[in-house]
Image (cartoon, helix red, strand yellow):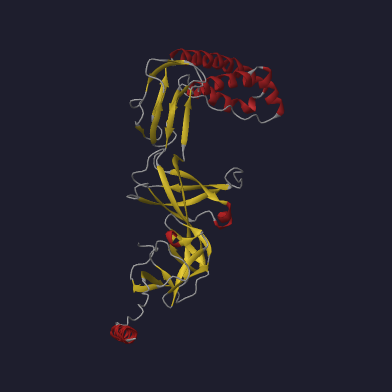
Amino acid sequence: MIRKIILAILGVLLVGGSVFMAKRTINNREVRKPRKEKKIKTGAFVEIVKNSSTPITITASGNLAATNRVDIYAEVQGIFNSSSRAFKPGTWYKKGETLLELDKKEEMIGLKAQKSSFYNQLVLLIPDLRLDYPEVIAKWDDYVRRFDVNLPLENLPEPETEKEKLFLSGRNIYTAFYNVKNLEAQLQNFTIAAPFSGVLTQAMVNPGALIRPGQKLGEFIDHSVYELEVAVNTAYGELLSIGKTVQLHNVEQTKNWTGKVIRVNSLVDPASQTIPTFIQVRGKGLKEGMYLEADITAKEEQNTYEINRKLLVDNNKVFIVRDTILDLVQIEPIYFKESTAVVKGLEDGMQILAKAIPSAYAGMTVKVFSDDKTAMKN
């Protein structure tokens, strides 16, 4: 009996001790506050949109070609005798100087023989004219006195009556006269003179060579004025006008020239849908075949803004910042340049990203930084 009482007392004490220890443990436990989730903000450089009028400049390129160009061909046969200067590529000739002269001794002798024969016909004609047409003998006497086989043949005196004309035709005077003039014209083809001051760009024969009719001898250009042919998109074809000023530069953009539109072809290239446009340019440093780029101001687009092409999303959207939150807005691209794009659809005062943010998305929280540099400069 006593044993049961002792066990009961120990049980009560054990339970009471357990409850006491449990309450103490609960009271001594440190209550931890829930940790707040921190939102990490990405830095964003922005610029303020201010729409304006943007000139649309078309950039086209091409190779220079001389405006005045002559391919030199032989019309007669002969030995290349001489030239005013060395007949070599790069040689400069003044207008009227001899580019080539072929040996024409035999032709000159033949011409003088033909002139002498014609002179004999005129001498035999004078007595008959004196008898039948005394009223015209004076002008024919004067013509015969001035006749010189070493000088170019002068034009015949004009017949005063139809009878006089028929009389001359019956004596073959006109036939003999035009035979001589034909030989004189052929003799001129033995000398090729520079039609303008310029440079020989091709020389395909050397002195002493036998030249044949139809043979190409070289190429001669006027190196003071050139043309640049460029292809312009048909969208701007109506805006091109003859006389429009065009800025030209080399590929390195170290040299600049000013040209003007002189011709606009009415034919559209079916493959590229472009219009051939010709720009005339003068200046130092220009060479035949030089590659140049032309900046043609086609028109001005009103209420537009120019941004860096890297900021475009799918070529028709752009990120703006609304109260530290990124938003994606629709825009209308008007013209693409090499590194920038002219767009419409942005409102004045909008905050647009000045620098692209990797993995940006609509709704993204950002921390805005002011940036004086525009997207174009970055």
166 is higher (above) or lower (below) than 6: above
- Residue at the front extreme, as displayed: 1
User: Quick one: 111 or 144, which is closer to the camera?
Assistant: 111
222 is higher (above) or lower (below) than 193: below
Q: Quadrant of the N terminus?
A: bottom left
User: Quick one: 291 or 182, which is closer to the camera?
Assistant: 291
The reply to whether residue 49 is visible in this rendering is no
Image location of residue 259, percent across then percent down: 43, 51
Image location of residue 254, percent across then percent down: 32, 50
Q: Looking at the rendering, which quadrant does residue 239 occupy? A: bottom right
Q: Looking at the rendering, which quadrant does residue 4 occupy? A: bottom left
Residue at 45% across / 15% down in the picture?
78
Residue at 38% across / 34% down in the picture?
199
Q: Looking at the rendering, which quadrant does residue 220 occupy? A: top left
343 is higher (above) or lower (below) than 27: above
The reply to whether residue 214 is visible in this rendering is yes
46 is higher (above) or lower (below) than 21: above
Image location of residue 280, percent across then percent down: 46, 47
Image location of residue 15, percent across then percent down: 34, 84
